[in-house]
Image: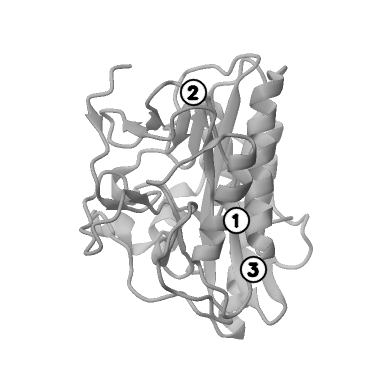
Amino acid sequence: MVCTSSLQPRLLSSFVGDLLIHSTAQQPLHHIFRYTQGGKNCASKNLSRTFSGLTDLLFSKRPSYVTSGQSPGIASGPEVHDEKGKECMRAAGRLAAQVLEYAGTLVKPGIKTDEIDEAVHQMIIDNGAYPSPLGYGGFPKSVCTSVNECICHGIPDSRALEDGDIVNIDVTVFLNGYHGDTSTTFFCGNVDDRVRKLVEVTKECLYKAIAICAPGVEFKKIGKTIHDHADKYRFGVVRQFVGHGVGRVFHSDPVVLHYRNNDPGRMVLGQTFTIEPMLTMGSFNPVMWDDNWTVVTSDGSMSAQFEHTLLITQDGAEILTQC
């Protein structure tokens, strides 16, 4: 597909699409975007393709940006929670993790990303939640599926996955007024060793960054940790798309940069945000397709991403988006 527009210097949420947000710092392009009660195995996996009762659920449980039709920006101020809010975030994160885990089991040669989207949509709805991407700034599907050279925000379609592909599946759910956001890059069949290494190192970058998180830690240490590890393997680090605060709103402060930087800001107790590094085998420069969502590497090289939603605790960081 011909790319009709490249990304210009602007501050973007990892899921804001092509919404222009002026940065007073005039820094390089930043991309910000980006229930089950009881036990971890309570999520319903009823994946029937008939959406019975869907209309009532969508109208009563969807976030405000769906009904307003407006493209949301980045909410100012951090997401900091009391005990009730933390439990709501845990529930949303747990459901997002369960949905992502199930979506990963569907990845195999021959499956269409549209089919993954349909399965994700139904599982989220069956568990009393809403798929946060659907209707966000006009995004047309319930999940992002980014294949091979796609850095992020791939729109599910009729393309069948092939042996040797990699695909990032990015799931966000809106449950009882809170968002849980997570993604993983999955292997499809037999994947080249060098590509496997890219995926493995990207995952390592995420967990190394999580390990340094705690109250009072500077956010810029996340970027240094990720960039240092990626450099060891000569992988590129995408600058234009970043992590973000998440909770009652889909995207809020802080902007979490995944590369070396000198931005101010420290983590605070009870705060929730995402870390979602995107690494590439070649150029880290992004190009946006004319759908105003799909972002690919400028040289067609492979890209991988991993993401978790975190809660800052006295002891460090609790990963909310894991089963």
Residue 44: x, y in percent? 69, 50
Using the image, determine if residue 69 lies above or below residue 147. Answer: below
Residue 90 numbered tag: 3
Residue 122: x, y in percent? 56, 42
Q: Is residue 20 visible?
A: yes
Q: Residues within 10 Å of mark 3 (few under 14, many from 20)?
A: many
Q: Residues within 10 Å of mark 2 (few under 14, many from 20)?
A: some
Residue under the image location 48 percent in, 51 percent down: 259
Q: How far apart are labels 2 and 3 at the CA level?
A: 36 Å
The quadrant in which the N terminus is found is top left
Residue under the image location 42 percent in, 48 percent down: 133
CB under 8 Å between discs 2 and 1: no
Disc nearest the viewer among 2 and 3: 2
Quadrant of the image occupied by residue 285:
top left
Q: Say which label, 1 or 3, has the lower sequence index.
A: 3
Q: Viewed as shown, does residue 235 lie left or right of 21?
A: right
Residue 263: x, y in percent? 40, 66
Can you identify the residue that label 2 sits on? 301
Residue 225 numbered tag: 1
